[in-house]
Amino acid sequence: MVSLNHYLVLSAILFAIGTAGVFVRRNLITILLSIEIMLNAVNLTFVAFGRALGAADGQIIVFFVMTVAAAEAAVGLAIVIALFRHRESLNPDSWTALKW
Amino acid sequence: MAFYVFAVIAVVASVLVIAQRNPIYSVLLLIASFGALSGLYVLLEAPFVAVIQIIVYAGAIMVLFLFVVMLLNAPHEETDYDERIHAYEAERGAGVPAERVRGAGAPGVNKVPMRFGGFLAAALAVELVWVLTKGGESGAFPSGAISSVKTIGQLLFTDYAFAFEVTSVLILVAMVGAVVLARRES
């Protein structure tokens, strides 16, 4: 029988995969994709809890998370395009000017 | 049963997303992962979320990613660096001790942050599983969930009306920001 815990564990695994992607990858696009994986893991948690509690609020939060994800993707990709024009590279190590 | 099928698809596709060196394949695999998540939402009796997952996420956001990947025309991670990362990943996958991985690195590579990051991610997974399952054995879901589009729409335009309006401002700001940021300097 699939219970709430199954969904929570799956969500934790997906979130950790996204975190690993942010740390391990050296490509701005892939890092943004990893952030999307993390956002989706959180969405799954919201929907699963909403189902367990019998409330529709979890799905409404998912609606807002998706909106924020869309805004984040639009702005993030615009920044990636601007950076790529600047340095012809997608490697985040190309921009370390603010690093001491 | 369907839960395990969708869960395996989602996890495998997500792992492949971060294992790919070509961002185009990453984006397409992420769409597959979102499809599996959409199936999970259907199993959770959230058809509205399942549909907007496909239409908005897979249909709009991922197409935006795909558009940028193809626009930039820089599909691969930088070759030199890439080879080192993949050698490292292949060895790690084979269960080789960390000392050998360190010795195999090309000169000038700082892999410590990445290994540390991978370790942190694994620790995060363990912690999250521990915390989330700490509530004890959760039983089966209650039957008869209220998750019709009607319920969601009513909540969205009554209890959450303010957040809904703020969302529209957020989208406007994001739109202006994207246009300004991506504008070519004249």
Image (cartoon, coloured by chain):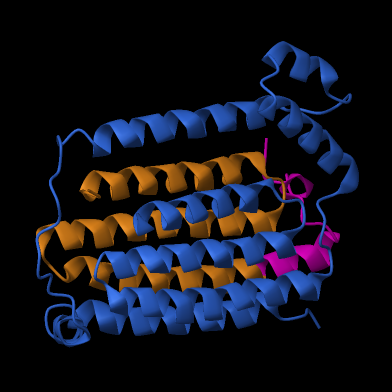
**Chain painted in blue in the figure:** B
Q: Quadrant of the C terminus of chain B?
A: bottom right
Q: Quadrant of the N terminus of chain B?
A: bottom left
Residue B78, above or below B42: above
**Is residue B146 left or right of B68 when viewed as pictured?**
left
Span highlighted in magenta in the image = A79-100
Residue B110: percent from left, percent from top: 76, 27
Is A97 magenta? The answer is yes
Assess whether residue A88 is covered by the magenta stretch: yes
Closer-to-camera residue (B112/B101): B101
Residue B90 x %, y %: 75, 32
Q: Quadrant of residue A85?
A: bottom right
Image position, residue B43 (x, y; %): 29, 65
- Horizontal side of B178 relative to B52 (left or right) equals right
Residue at x-position 58% and y-position 32%: B118
Residue A14 to residue B60: above or below: above
Which of the two residues, A44 or B119, is positioned nearer the viewer here?
A44
**Total residue callouts:** 0
Residue name at image x 21 percent, y 49 percent: A3
Give the colour in which the image draws chain A: orange
Q: Nearer the viewer, residue A68 or A52?
A: A52
Place of residue B15 in the rendered image (x, y in percent of width and height, measured from the top left): 58, 47
Whether residue B47 sits left or right of residue A54 in the image: it is: right
Q: Residue at x 25, y 39 (%)?
A: B132
Indicate left or right for A4 with B38 as reference: left
- Vertical arrangement, residue A55 with respect to residue A20, above or below: below
Q: Residue at x 63, y 27 (%)?
A: B115
